[in-house]
Amino acid sequence: MHDILDLDRFPLHRPHTPDWQALVDRCRADLAAEGMFNLDGLMRPGIAAQAVAETAPRFAADAFLHERTHNIYFKPVEGLPPDHPALRQFQTSNRTLCADQIAGSALLRLYEWPQFATFLAATMDKPELHVMEDPLACVNVMSYREGQALNWHFDRSEFTTTLLLQAPDQGGGFEYRTDLRSDGDPNYDGVARLLRGEDPESKVITLSPGTLNVFKGKNTAHRVTPVKGARERVIAVFSYYERPGVTFSDAERLGFYGRAS
Ligand SMILES: [Fe+2]
């Protein structure tokens, strides 16, 4: 793994040693304070660039164009009128490659490396994490061209694990508003205020290629701002679950990838 990861700075290959534990502790503190942690340069930038170069022909030829109009919840909300400002509609657009389209990639090597799951589980305070048994959904690579964006939403899963492969010239920032809602309070007025662009607690960060980002997005609203310029934003998404053997349903694969297998 030394060839693709900077294990000198991030000793994921030595689980439960003092250096590894110190890194886990730092990540847990960041998660508690900010709802995310970043390992800047975990993947060597040259390897990230190589992964982009390898995926470019597949993006050009047969990536799925994922486009949808949605509100921040991806669905209507019982008790709220359709014109409520918290239900404002936005556009999301990207190109998606599935794991079966990146065979041989360093991204799959990293995903299947047991020490990666061991490290992530420790940062998330989970007993263990398992790879998906879904040949499409386990690792996805998304590309955002000029004008494309991932718009405001809350996540379905508690944690999202991504690795930025290429940053755009401009735009493509990660904007988030920590704890905009809670499990007991949907805070529709606060949601409406954020969507009007009037929430002073909203933050934007830009990541550099090779950065691992782990993010708690269930109650923290977030989006990727529109990409500007010729260079695409390319990001890998790794999906782990607390139980083994998880797959998407055919309906989910059709919705996310336009194909069931
Ligand atoms: Fe998300």
Image: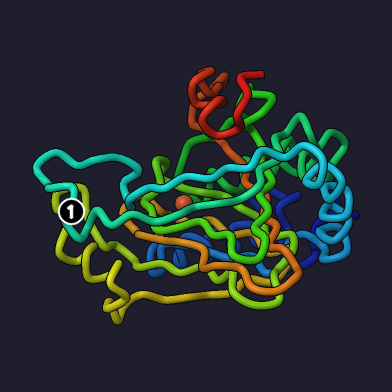
Among all residues in the image, which is located at the extreme bottom? 200
In which quadrant will I find the C terminus?
Answer: top right
Task: Residue 108 in the image: state x and y as whole percent.
Answer: 77, 39
In the depicted structure, whether residue 247 falls above or below residue 205: above
Residue at x-position 51% and y-position 63%: 224
Which of these two is toward me, 234 or 66? 66
Residue at x-position 9% and y-position 42%: 79
Which of these two is toward me, 19 or 180? 180
Q: How many marks?
A: 1
Q: Residues within 10 Å of mark 1 (few under 14, many from 20)?
A: few
Mark 1 residue element: loop
Q: What residue would you read off at disc 1?
A: 83
Query: CB at mark 1 closer than 8 A to ligand 1?
Result: no
Left or right of residue 200: residue 132:
right
Residue at x-position 88% and y-position 48%: 54
Left or right of residue 87: residue 224:
right
Task: Residue 243 in the image: state x and y as whole percent.
Answer: 50, 25
Which of these two is toward me, 108 or 173? 173
In the depicted structure, whether residue 122 falls above or below residue 256: below
The scheme the figure's colours follow is: rainbow
Which of these two is toward me, 196 or 123? 196
Residue at x-position 72% and y-position 40%: 63
Left or right of residue 188: residue 233:
right
> In which quarter of the view is residue 231 placed?
bottom right
Amino acid type assigned to the residue bearing label 1 in the image:
Asp
Task: Residue 96 in the image: state x and y as whole percent.
Answer: 66, 43
Task: Residue 127 in the image: state x and y as whole percent.
Answer: 48, 36
Among all residues in the image, which is located at the extreme left? 79
In the depicted structure, whether residue 17 falls above or below residue 134: below
In the depicted structure, whether residue 32 falls above or below residue 79: below
